[in-house]
Structure formats: C-alpha cells, structure tokens
Amino acid sequence: MRTRFWVELLFLIAGPVIWLAHYLFIYIVNALHCARRQSWLGAAWTALPVSSWIILCGSALALSAMAWAAIRQHRRVAAHGLPKFHAKLTVALCLLSGLAVVWQTLPVFMVSECR
Amino acid sequence: MTTPVPVSTPSQSLPNPLPRPPGELELLEQVWRRPRGIRSLTVVNNNHIGVLYIGTALLFFVLAGVLALLMRAQLAVPESGLISHELYNQLFTMHGTVMMFLFAVPAVEAVAVLLLPNMLGARDLPFPRLSAYAYWAYAVGGVVFFCSLFAGLAPDGGWFMYPPLTSTQYSPAVNADLWLLGIGFIEISAIAGAVELAVGILRTRAPGMSLEKMPIFAWVMLVFSGMVIVAFPAVIVATALLELERAFDMPFFIAERGGDPLLWQHLFWFFGHPEVYIIFLPAAGMVSMIIPAMTGTPLVGYRLVVLAIIGTAFLSFGLWVHHMYATGIPPLSLSFASAASMAVSIPTAIQVFAWIATIAAAVRLRPVKTPMLFILGFFFIFILGGLTGVMVAVIPFDMQVHDTYFIVAHLHYVLFGGMVFPLFAAFYYWMPFVSTRALSERLGRWAFWLMFVGFNVAFFPMHLTGLAGMPRRVYTYAESQGWGALNMVSTVGAYLIGAGVLVFLWDLARNFRPSSEHNAGNVWNAGTLEWLPSANYGLRSIPVVTTRDPLWDQPGIDDDVAAGRYFLPNAPAGLRSTLVTNALDARPEYVLPLPGPGWSPFVAALGTAGFFLLLTFKLTLPAGVCGVLAIAAIWRWLWDSDSAPDIPPVSIGAGIRLPMGCSGRASHAWWAMMMLIIVCLSIFGALIFAYLFLWVTSPEVWPSAAALVPLAWPGLSAVLLVGACAVAIHAARKLSQGGVGALKGYLPFGMVLLIAASALDLYAYWQQGLRPQESAYAAVVFALIGLQATFTVLTCLMGIFTVARVLAGRLSAARRACVDSTLIIWHYTVAQGLISLGIIHGFPRLAAG
C-alpha cells in the first residue's frame, strides 16, 4: 500500500524531532527565567522555581509523545504493509531520544538555574 | 504514475532482450560525450564535475596545510621573528576557514557528486547544471578568496569571526568583509549541492532500492543534506547581520545600542557545531562502505548504523552551546548542552562498534590494504579525539582548558582523525573507479605511516602544551614559559604530515589517470553498484536491486547491466536522461530528460562570484554588472528546461512506458522547491531568533505600545499580501482550465500587490521616524523588512520569467513546472510576510501588555 513520503519521514524521525523541540523549549524557558528574574517563572514551588516545573512537564510531554509516535508507527507499518525496518528505526530513535531527554532533565535537580 | 517492478529478476526475465538494437549504444555514447577543448568548461556530467570538485578541494587542503606549516615553523622556537603577528592572525584565520569551508564540506560533497549517481544506479544527478554552477562558484570564489592572503587582505579575526573584534571599530579594513561576503556565497553553493544530492538520493534510486536497501553512504549524504539545509542558513543570517552592521552601522552586536555579541555566537555555533558532524558523518559513511569491501562481509548492524547517523545528526544541533561555556550563560542551560554532548557519544559509539564487529567477522582482511590502514588510523585517532571530547563536555574541565592548545589538539584529533583519514582511505579505495589504474600500495603505506606518525607527534603533545597553559592563536611565546620543547616536537610532526601528503601527491602524479570510460574496475571485489561497469553515461542500463550488496547477491548483474538488459538502456528522444523513482520503495515513475553541456552555469558562477567579491571592495557598479550577468545566465539556463510534453512516453523495458518528465507534486522540481522552502524557513527562523534574543537581552530598547506604528498600516499590508495570494491561486486555477493567457495579467498584478505590501511596511516605519542605526530593535525590524523585500524581489524575478515563458509559448497547462515553482515561492513569500508583520507589530504590543 502506498503512503506519503513526508508523513512517513516524520514518523521515522519523530523521536529526534521531539527531542530537538524539547531541547529548544527547555533552553528557552530557563533563559527567560534567568533574564527576567522577577517574573512569575522565578516563583519557587516546593524547592524548584516554576521554570523548572515547566521543564519537567515538558520532559514528561516529550517522553509521552515519543511513546505515542513509536506505538502509532508500529500500527501504521502493519496497516500499510511497510517494511518492518521503518517501525524498528522509529522505535530505536525514540529510545535514544528518550534517553537524551531523561539525561538532559536530570540537571534540573542538581544544578542551580541561573548562577 | 507508479509502475510495478518485478522484485526478482532471473536472467531470462530481465526487462530488455538481447541483442540490443543497432546504433543504441552509439547514440547513448554520443549524447553523453564529454565536450573537448575550450568547451570542456561547459561539462556538466557528475563524473567529470566530481573529479574537478575533489581536485579543487584537495588543492585547498594542500594550501591550508602549507599555512599550517608556516605557523608551525613560527612556533617551533620561542620568541621567533619569522612571521609578524598581523600575518600570523591571517594565517590561522585562513587555515581554519579554508579547511572548514573550502576543503572539508566541498570535499565530502564532491565525493558524493562523483559516486552517488553510480551508487544509486542513476546516470547523473537530477540537476547537472546546478552541480556545475555550484562547483564553478566555489572554485572561482575560493581561489580569489585565498589569494587575498598575498595582498595582506585576508581575514584575521579567527575562523569564527567573533564580534566585537570583527566589528568596524576593531577591524575597520576590508579583511573581515572578505570573509563575510566570500564565505557567505560559498555557503550558498554548499546549499545548492545539498538540495541536489537530497533530491538525487530520494528520487533517482535504482528500481527496488527501498530505504532499507540504500547504501550507507547514501543515507549519510541524505542526512548531510538535511543538516546543511537547516544549519547553513543560521550562519548566512549571522554573516548578513554582521555585514549590515559593518556597512550601515546597524547595531546587532553593539551592546551600547542594545545589541549583543553573544547573538553572533549563538547563530554561528548553531551552524558551527552541526558543521563538525556535517563533515564527520559523510566520512563515517565512507568508512561504512570501505570496511565491508575490505573484509568481504556485509556491514554488521546496518539498521543500528542508520539509527546512529540520524541520531547523531539531530543531537549535534543541541551541542552549539558547548562552544560557549565560558560566556556567562546560566549553569542549568550549560548543563543541557553538556548532557547533549555526552549523549551524542552513544550513537557515535554504535557506529564504531558496528565497524569493529564487521572487521571481527571478516572473511578476508590480510594483507591489510592501504584504505584499511587509513581506516585503522582513523579508529585510533578519532576515538582519542572522542574521549577528549567527553572531557571537554564536562564544564569545569572545559573552563580550565578553554582557549588553550588542549582544544587545538582535541579538534584536530576529531577533524583530522574523523574526516581526513577516512577521506584518504576513500581516495585509495575509489581511485580505481575514476582512474585507469589504482594507486600504489607501497607509496600508500609510506603516505599512511608518515601521516599517522606525524599526526600523533604533532598533536598529542598539544594536549600537554594546553594543560601547561599555552593559549591558542598566540604568534609567539617567551622561553621562560617552558613550552619550547613540546612546540618543537609538534612542528616536527607537522612536517612529517606534510611529507606524507607529498608522497600521496607523488603517487597521484604517477598513477592517477582519470577516465570514466576505461576505469580499473572492481579491484576490491566490492558489493555496491558503483563498481558495475560504467562509462560517461554512467551505467549502460539501470538494474533492479533486491539486496544491499547487489554485486555479491545478484549473480551476473554486472554482465546484464553492461549488456543493456535492464531498464533504460538507451537515450530516448536522443536526450540525456535518467530514471526517476518514488522516494519510499523506488518504483519507476518517469524518465527525466537531463540537460547537456552549456555555458550558462559557468557564466552564472563567474557572475555570482564577481558580484560578491567586488561588493567586498565596494566596487558597486562592476558588482552590479556581474549580478546582472549571473541573473541573465541563470535565465538562459532555465529557459530550455521543462520541454517534457513535446516528447511522447518512452519504453524503458519490461513493457513499461513512462512519460518523459513530470509536473506537480510527483516531480523532482517540486521536491527541490520544498527543500528550498526549508532553507527559506531556516533563514527566517534564524532572523526571528535574533529578534527574540535581542528582546530577551535588551528589553530597554524595545518601544512601548504607544510608540509603535498604528495597526492600520500592517493591516493594509496584510490585505495586500492576502490579495497577492488570492490572485496567484486564481491564476493557477485559470491555467489548469487551459487559460494560459490569464497569467499575463494576473501575475504582474499580483507582483504589484507584493511590492506594495513590502514598500508600505517600510514606509510606515520610516515616516514614524525609526532609523536602523538607532538601536538593535530598529536594526532587527529593518532586517525583517529587508528579508521580506528580498523575497519579494526574488518572487517578482520568477514571476517575470514565468510571464516571459507565456509570451514565448513555452508554458501550457501540461508544461507548467515553471509556474508551479514560482507559485511555491510566491505563497511562501506571502506567508513569511504575514508572520513577519505579526511579529514586528504584534510582539512588542504583547510584550508591553
């Protein structure tokens, strides 16, 4: 069965695309917090500032999106009769990207935000 | 149109029968004949342009290497007076710049231009004249750029050209402008090459070569192209902003007026770090091709290697901040980059383990041949560079060694080990593909050992020199600092590398006899398609591929291809052509007529190079003449394209008849335009980033809502833009209904609306009293308006070209690729204009509110 290349490409690289979006998002959130120290982003809640909570939520969202993409691609590959290589590539890239998201989120608990 | 292709091809059921009709091969040879004499400048075949391209890149490698040897001679002893500090500054700037922009990226693109069509089973790349244009622009521009050194005008601000050192205040001479304009347009040449390679890989693969059967080198070049398309625009924007600052005093990087020098670093390194992988990944791809051939074993972990290539490419975009650890960025933000820097070692390690596993599974390895020697050298050096990479990813360690010779050692271990050694392996490995004889094994061993020993003798001590505190980019040092002995050892090593390169050049002189007709052939018993018998026309016929290593797994394929038993064994309609297949599973869709030799790409390249280089010296009138020459040549070049409907469908074999050419979304032109749109989006995105970054760092120069232009102005501009879009849609609809003549009225009217929208926005700010020199805010607003104006001019040029084709009777409902391409850019310009209006007029109101 035929499938559109650009949709397929998006599923194949879903993991790293989500990772990149997550990376840019958390970088910007922390940068904004540090540039505007008096804003609501800096308000503390249970030992972490709001900006860090937003980062944690972003990470949870990114991991969920990767899981969704991997499962959906599995079903698509079966439904469209695509090579299993496509499903394996998506899942493996989601795993690698998920690891990178977790690895990048850990410093939130260990490193001070702005100085 | 998609056509079923037999998945298995037993010899008796091949697409075309024997004997082939008389005159078929002669016609094929005739249409693909290489031009001779002065007309050899008009050559466009990938197998000729590719060799020229590689030769030119090698020339720049040697020239930049000579600069390095001069620097090492200066540093050999303390307090040396051999070279002045002014010249030393130019030497290290040119060494880095030439190696990165004129050697490394063009070299890997060049290898791809030469090899990919054969590797994929195509006759040529889909836009041969674009290859020729990209090559000549690079060659002419690069040589002039390099020669600036002899006039003392070479750039001297370091290969990354940080402001404020490179601002007008500290670098008033044209040296910096030469870098900004010279390198800026060489990047455009790299992007042109990347678009062509990506379309070639996705659309001209041999039937049956689905994604999981693509050679790894095709995968890496596809990923490479994506990275170039996304990363290079960032540095194009950076260079444009710095040049605007230098030429018109627009203060993007001047802190006193709300600018920020760190903006340059963000933009530069968002390009600069992926650049490292843009260079490394193709080299790794070459390694993944060479090791299976040398070991007689398919690559172990093909799927994991593909995963690693894609993963590395993406992660590399998250590493730009690790070049900025010492700039005062918040620690948590640095930690994100640090984590990404460590994470990227995972996919890189996957590749290394896959190579080691393939070697472990070797069925033939001894005697170790020269390409394999270079690969083993690459392992040793690159892995050491990777380990020091993990060390400098650790922020406290990096703070200690920042800007010292430790970093010089690290980056050379990564780049020389990761790119130059695989490239030399590739030279030795693929030489029989382009030459009548292979290079000498004996000289190859000499070259390898001299380079390998020389490299380690030169660069390993630099780790120690750096830890001892020697900073980078100093032209001399005091004897009392105790760095003399280590530097002398490094200099000796550097000259040993030079000796190794000389041996290689001697080997080339003795054994390299270029020929695409009578090459030495498959001397390694490799398994991929580029080793099939080939000539000027590429493969005699285009095979059906059922495995990743067809020459190993499809017995007799070489004889059958050479006999013309597979697809398209002829030159339909007496034209050069290649088979276009679909992107996912490579089923034949249409036959693409290809252009032959022509002067237009060469003249267009000269015009482009002249425009940028003369502009550097503020020779506005000659630069303008060159610009017009370039546009006229490109016009001439495109005028003959899209001739498809005049030719009836042609038979390619197996009873399949395919159209000659295609329009709409299935066409290769549409795919190239989509990639161009991604480039445009990246440029626009980088400029929006600049706007928001400057707002974050300098909110004080942003105006209050009351001081902004009244909303009626952008409202009117938006209406004009939407009107231009509606006119274009209506014109396209009329064309589909056969009303070609309607374009003559609609398109000019739409162009007037586009120009009016741009002019109105500019006027609104001007009459409000805003001037681009006032502040970073004003500068970036005018930059966004300027970008929109640039796209408006581009769209109008394409619109005028389209109308001219209507008037000349070269456009119809069936022959509409030109109007389709124009409308893609047209709609993009409208969309960009609307978003730009929203940001310029909406964001300050939101931020103030």
Image: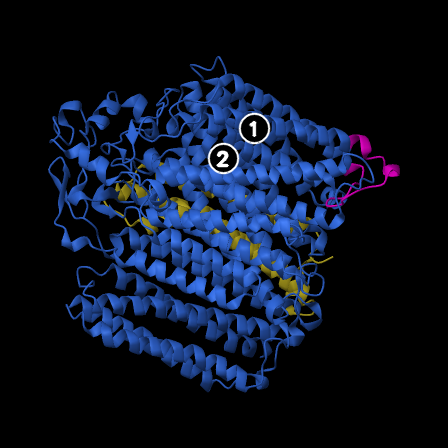
**Secondary structure at numbered mark 2:** helix
Residue on which the image places disc 1:
B378
Query: In the orientation shown, which residue stands out farthest toward the top?
Result: B367
Q: Which residue matches tag 2?
A: B283
Mark 2 or mark 1: whose residue is earlier in sequence? 2
Q: Chain of mark 1?
A: B
What range of the chain is rendered magenta? B466-486
On screen, residue A104 above or below B459: below
Badge 1 amino acid: Phe
Q: Position of residue B432 (x, y in %)?
A: 40, 25
Position of B747 relative to B34 (above/below): below
Q: Residue at x 62, y 66 (%)?
A: B246
Q: In the figure, the yellow chain has which letter?
A: A
- Relative to B848, say whether B179 is above or below: above
Question: Which of the 4 quarters of the picture holds residue B690?
Answer: bottom right
On the picture, is B299 further left or further right than B806?
Answer: right
Residue B409: x and y, percent? 68, 36
Image position of B429 (left or right of B634):
right
Q: Amino acid at mark 2?
A: Ala
Question: Which chain corresponds to the colour blue?
Answer: B
Q: Residues within 10 Å of mark 2 (few under 14, many from 20)?
A: many
Residue B317: x and y in percent read 54, 49
Expressed as whole percent of the image width and height from the top left, the position of residue B347 reads 52, 36
